[in-house]
Image (cartoon, rainbow, N blue to C red):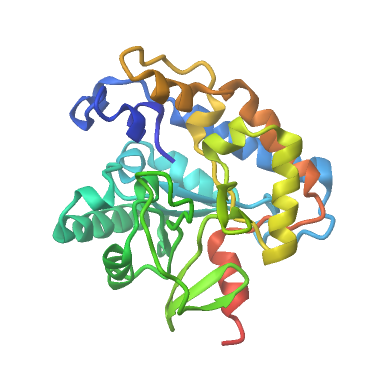
Amino acid sequence: MEDWFQVENFRQCIPSSSWPGYELRVEQSTHRILDLLDSATSALGTGSSEAHPSGRSSLRATFFVLGWIGERLPGLVREIQERGHEVASHGYNHVLCNQMLPHEVKTDLEVSKKLIEDICGKPVCGYRAPSFSINAEVLELVEACGYLYDSSFNSFSIHGRYGKLDLSACGNRGVVARISESFSEIPISNLEVGARVIPWGGGGYFRLIPFSLFKRGVRSILRKRGAYVFYLHPWEVDPDQPKVRNASRVYRFRHYLNLGRSLDRLRMLATAFRDCRSVTCHEYLQEMTRDE
């Protein structure tokens, strides 16, 4: 959960020092997602989904909130929680973990966690690194800072910003990789075809891949793993956001592709998998580790 001007593709054009001068649009785009989750729940009925104790959405999500955003929009962060969803940390100002020194990563983890906890009045359990920039050293810091899980590993290794982890020695329950007795990794879901990993977790790939094909890939992942971890940014449902003209053509293509279709595709995804439950990362972690 970051705003349109905070994405890594625009970092060279829009440094963080200039962020206060840009229009905040994340509130209205986040409301679109929240409203869709509520309306999709009403349209589909409860079915096999469990009702949330609050009586709100049974299509539940985890919102990994950038501390910079939470500081400016605390009411939005509280509303996310009140509407039945999990609030977790995305760090403070979207600097890639591999571009910070270890003590800077630790400070970023601690500051963002405390900030969100102060807003919500409850512990923050999860963390997602900007642009999935995780590695073994950062993972150790995430655990040391008191998080219960990380959800930053994307196995699509061709992408230059994504970090690398070896989870082969971890015990697995569903898609959860147990790092230690009290800490886990919940990787982004990708499609495996032979030895190849094809990015299928969401984001720009969700906007690029034809929906009928994307749906087939998700069903394949569900059959194999029993769960599917999907992600989307609020700015991806905001087709009217300002255009950054001085970014490279490749970065503009990645950012603006099919923004006008994202919300409808998200609604179609909810409908296509109405027989599945949609739960937060922490809820899924609790289910997978309940008997340990």
Image point 39% across, 50% down: which residue?
132
**Based on the displayed image, in which of its 4 quarters is residue 267 positioned?**
top right
User: Quick check: 108 left or right of 216?
Assistant: left
Task: Pinpoint residue 222: horizontal percent, then vertical percent.
Answer: 71, 59
Q: Residue furthest front?
A: 195
Image point 76% across, 56% down: which residue?
276
Tell me if residue 276 comes above or below residue 285 in the rendering.
above
Image point 51% across, 16% down: which residue?
240
- Depth check: give the residue in front, 222 or 22: 222
**Based on the displayed image, in which of its 4 quarters is residue 35 positioned?**
top right
User: Quick check: 272 left or right of 284?
Assistant: right
Tell me if residue 8 comes above or below residue 251 in the rendering.
below
Task: Pinpoint residue 223: horizontal percent, then vertical percent.
Answer: 75, 62
- How many numbered badges does the structure rendering display? 0
Q: Is residue 268 visible?
A: no
Q: Is residue 47 visible?
A: yes
**Based on the displayed image, in which of its 4 quarters is residue 16 positioned?**
top left
